[in-house]
Amino acid sequence: MLNIFIMGILVSVAVRHAYAHFRPQQHEEAEKPHSHVQPQSAHLPPAVKERLLQASQSHFQAVLNRSAAELQQDLKSTAFHLNKQLEKLGTDIISDEMKRYHASLDQLRKQTETTMFSAQAEIAVHQTEIKAKLAKRQAELEAQMVQDIATEKQLLIKNIDTKLADAVASFLTETLQHNVDLGAQTAYLTSVLEEHKAEIIKGVNDEV
Amino acid sequence: MKFRLPDSIASPQDLNALLIEIQQYAKWFEHESIKKQINAKHPSESPTLSPSALEILRSHEANKALDQSSLESIIDTLEKYKKTSPSITVTLAAPPTGTVKNTLVAWCRKNIAPDVLVAFQFNATLLGGIVVRYGSHIFDLSFRRQILAARERFPEVLRNV
């Protein structure tokens, strides 16, 4: 930007200088012949004067054209150089900016890679911890489940056994109570009493 | 006076009935004694006595001739039995026959106490065996009790079949 600004200043200075250079010459040249012609014109015939005037005009026109052409050529050359300089300047600036941009990109990429590596390492550690915890928890749950299933199985077997025992006991009490023969049981009754004699005597004595 | 109760007199109800019989007999005996003293004719018939009452009177008569005082002594003894004898209740799976009753009473009087009174009940759900109750003590020796006590072994036995 600074270079463009300086170039602009140089161009404006050159234009002004060229303008100031050519304008005063035309004026002085227009005035000088006028001051010289004026006194001579009084002595010269109008035709000569006319021819001189035309000659000087054409001469002036030629000089003016040549100067304009040179100026145009200079301007072209200057513009070309300026363009070239501007192009070079722009290229340099862009190149510098690109280098800085690439450098910062590289730095950012390196930082990002470092961060990513550390993050990946942390994630890997975390994953390992989670997997270990998961495996431990799974083992605990499996052990608990096995134990629960065993407990439930034992409970069910116990319930079935209880119901079966109740059923058998009910069946026996229902079927056996209809045909009781005490005569056949007499010996058994005395033997049972003999077996529990001490217990019965103790109970009677305690009661007395 | 002390005598052994016959095994046929098992329960307090039996003892009560025996007591009433002896009292009635003693009353009749007293009346007859008075009639003899006044030489009254037309003696009345003696009250009918149960074999148990007759057994007691005969056993007493074997030692000494019956008189009013001996009858009163028998009544006093029976009253004493009624008040002091221990009483147990025996529950069986069916109404007991006389043989069963006598066997059990004899066993009780031999092993528990000579004057023990035994009341009999029956409960068909016992299936068999015997339940002896004395006061707050219950000795359940029934089949039902044994079946219920051993019911936890039924599944194991069935599994081994």
Image (tube, coloured by chain):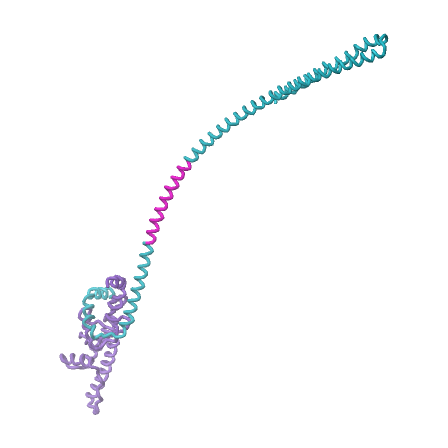
Chain colours: A cyan, B purple
Whole-percent x and y of residue A157? 31, 59
Q: In the displayed structure, does residue B49 sit left or right of residue A37?
A: left
Residue A135 on the magenta segment: yes
* Viewer-side residue, A13 vs B129: A13
Q: Vertically, is B98 above or below A133?
A: below
Whole-percent x and y of residue A172? 27, 69
Question: Looking at the image, how many numbered discs can be counted on the residues?
Answer: 0
Q: Vertically, is A9 above or below B43?
A: above
Question: Where's the N terminus of chain A, which quadrant?
Answer: top right
Question: Where's the C terminus of chain A, which quadrant?
Answer: bottom left
Whole-percent x and y of residue B51? 20, 81
Residue A206 on the magenta segment: no
* Viewer-side residue, A129 vs B8: A129
Q: In the displayed structure, does residue A162 sit left or right of residue A96?
A: left
* Viewer-side residue, A11 vs A71: A71
Q: Residue reaching furthest left?
A: B63
Whole-percent x and y of residue A145? 35, 51
Q: In the displayed structure, does residue A104 sit left or right of residue B47?
A: right
Q: Quadrant of residue B161?
A: bottom left
Residues in magenta, as a range: A122-149
Asked if one can make out residue B87 in the rendered structure from this viewpoint, the answer is no
* Viewer-side residue, B21 vs A6: A6
Q: Vertically, is A76 above or below A124?
A: above
Q: Residue reaching furthest bottom?
A: B41
Asked if one can make out residue A135 in the rendered structure from this viewpoint, the answer is yes
Q: In the displayed structure, does residue B43 sit left or right of residue A155?
A: left
Could you tell me which residue is drawn at 47 percent across and 32 percent down?
A: A112
Q: Quadrant of residue A152?
A: bottom left
Magenta portion: prevailing SS class: helix
